[in-house]
Image (cartoon, coloured by chain):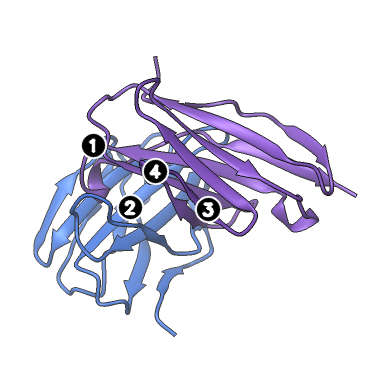
């Protein structure tokens, strides 16, 4: 079955540590996204990529980095510069980025600070 | 004013009841409208797109009012399994411009 796989499901970060969240899709979608969800808030866009080897900052990119070396993969690194990293992180994909495109989500990674 | 606003609830309704909630948006250029459902600590899943003429999918009906800038979701004959948070999602163009509401929490009671 096609879908989006995120790993790990739970991740703990120590002070000053960088951590990387994995996102893989086999839907053959061109566009991929990373969102952050905090309790009681809507999802906020961190980064997105419309095509391999290209990505754009979203609304809250500071303290995060991404890469898009393969169509299937869009890993997110939470750097030590992100001072409040505790949140639920969701990866998504869509066929493209035209009007009306639907987002499909992975099952999420809960990141907590030790 | 938030770009997309929803009443966070919680809405507690008995099984079999009809429940409706609205979502208002501030960007008059919005062209894409969706309702997603999210269970606790799970990923959002597309419930339905919202079209200008309104649309229905089984017990669920979605409507768009461009003049007043809101979308609505109506659930008829509610089931226990409808308990979830419902996210309103609106945007002026492509998926990268979509804005998520904070969600409306719904609990269906037996």
Give a yes or no on whether discs 3 and 2 share a subunit: no
Q: CA distance from mark 4 to mark 2?
A: 32 Å
Assess disc 3: are there few (<14), some (14-19) or many (≥20) residues with their C-alpha within 10 Å of its C-alpha: some
Q: Quadrant of the N terminus of chain B?
A: top left
> Looking at this rendering, what residue extends furthest in the right direction?
B110
For chain A, give the colour: blue
Which mark, by number, is residue A34?
2
Is B35 situated left or right of A60 in this image?
right
Reply above or below: A72 against B88.
below
Residue A28, x across and y down, in percent? 25, 77
Q: Nearer the viewer, residue B101 or A59?
A: B101
**Residue marked by disc 4:** B53
**Residue marked by disc 3:** B56
Q: Are marks 1 and 2 in contact (CB under 8 Å)?
A: no
Q: Residue at x 39, y 43 (%)?
A: B53
Chain letter for mark 2: A
Q: CA distance from mark 3 to mark 1?
A: 23 Å
For chain B, give the colour: purple
Q: Are marks 4 and 2 in contact (CB under 8 Å)?
A: no
């Amino acid at each position: 079955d096609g879908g989006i796989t995120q790993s790990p499901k739970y991740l703990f970060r120590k002070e000053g540590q960088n951590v990387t969240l994995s996102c893989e899709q086999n839907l053959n979608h061109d566009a991929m996204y990373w969102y952050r969800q905090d309790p009681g808030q809507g999802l906020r866009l961190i980064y997105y990529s419309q095509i391999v080897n290209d990505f754009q900052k979203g609304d809250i990119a500071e303290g995060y980095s991404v890469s898009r070396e393969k169509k299937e993969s869009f890993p997110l690194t939470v750097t030590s510069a992100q001072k409040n990293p505790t949140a639920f992180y969701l990866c998504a994909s869509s066929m493209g980025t035209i009007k009306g495109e639907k987002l499909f989500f992975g099952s999420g990674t809960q990141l907590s600070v030790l | 004013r938030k770009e997309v606003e929803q009443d966070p609830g919680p809405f507690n309704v008995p099984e079999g009841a009809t429940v409706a909630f609205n979502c208002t948006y501030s960007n008059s250029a919005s062209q894409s409208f969706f309702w997603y459902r999210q269970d606790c600590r799970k990923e959002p899943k597309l419930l339905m797109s919202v079209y200008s003429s309104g649309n229905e999918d089984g017990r669920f009906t979605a409507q768009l009012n461009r003049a007043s800038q809101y979308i609505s979701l109506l659930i008829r004959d509610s089931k226990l399994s409808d308990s979830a948070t419902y996210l309103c999602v609106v945007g002026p163009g492509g998926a990268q411009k979509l804005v998520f509401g904070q969600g409306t929490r719904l609990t269906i009671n037996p």
